[in-house]
Image: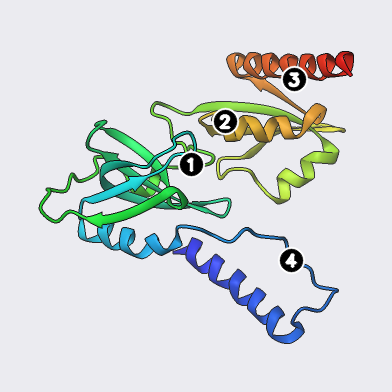
Amino acid sequence: MAYTKRHLEIHSAIAELHKHYGDRDFIQFDTVPEPRGIEYLEPIARAIEEQKVLRLYYLPFYEDKPYFNELHPYILKEYQFRWYLVAWNAFREQLRTYALDRIRDLQESPELEYRAPDFDAAGYFRYAMGIIAPEGAPELIKMRVQKTQAQYLITMPWHPSQNIAEEGEDFVVFSFRLHPTYEFKSKVLSLGKDAEILGPLNLREKLAVELRMMAAGYEDQRLSS
């Protein structure tokens, strides 16, 4: 409920700005893409609450034509201006995540028996960053950040598990307990030379490989220009 209250307060404050100042030049909002697929929010939420199976026609980014899915819907999640559905795919017999803006058609299948989730929906994304929640135990990750960048993480934490493990004159070591997903690694790399993963070693090595590949790509481009 706290999550909903916070968002309502934010939307209320923005609405007040629009009401009193309109489109004045001294107040500038970020450009937000028009959300797509939000027309499916209500029917999916209803299906989750009423435990109804859904027939979903879905078009992934890497396919030319939509395909049919039989889904048992469990969770709706918003992330970076997109809505996603976590559901049990009866054909693949596994949990899958679907972007609502890639849905092409949606229908209820009342004749099919609903498969109840065997996990805690409230805690499904507890150790995740983004929309992917891998199975297994989360990892304890430590990251050293230069003081100039650390203040941004302190005032705008990346994840609820974020803590300060150590603080020096010109650096801060942050700890996280989560799955090192693509989203997390991307955020680390976005800090450039100001961030360094201290552990676990396998994550540090993976990022080192990616950084070497990035550097090689820039070097090749320089030589060919």
Q: Which of 169 and 125 is in front in this view?
A: 125
The numbered disc on residue 214 is: 3
Q: What element carries label 4?
A: loop
Residue 25 in percent (x, y) is at: 84, 74
Q: Residue at x 78, y 45 (%)?
A: 151
Give how far apart the Cα atoms at labels 2 and 3 are: 16 Å
Q: In this view, does 130 lie above or below 30?
A: above
Give how far apart the Cα atoms at labels 1 and 2 are: 10 Å
Instruction: Please report contact status of discs 2 and 4: CB closer than 8 Å, yes or no.
Output: no
Q: Nearer the viewer, residue 176 or 191?
A: 191
Residue under numbered circle 4 = 29
Residue under numbered circle 2 = 182
Residue under numbered circle 1 = 131
Q: Residue at x 67, y 81 (%)?
A: 16
Label 2 vs 4, first from the N-terminus: 4
Which quadrant: the C terminus? top right
Q: Is residue 1 above or below residue 140?
A: below
Q: Tell me if mark 4 has few (under 14), some (14-19) or many (20+) residues whose alpha carbon lies within 10 angstroms of its own.
A: few
Kind of residue indicated by mark 2 = Tyr
Instruction: Please report contact status of discs 1 and 2: CB closer than 8 Å, yes or no.
Output: no
On the image, which quarter does residue 39 sit in? bottom left
Kind of residue indicated by mark 3 = Met
Give how far apart the Cα atoms at labels 1 and 4 are: 26 Å
Q: Is residue 132 above or below residue 215?
A: below
Kind of residue indicated by mark 4 = Phe
Instruction: Please report contact status of discs 1 and 3: CB closer than 8 Å, yes or no.
Output: no
Q: Residue at x 65, y 13 (%)?
A: 205
Give how far apart the Cα atoms at labels 1 and 3 are: 25 Å
Q: Is mark 2 on a helix, strand or loop?
A: helix
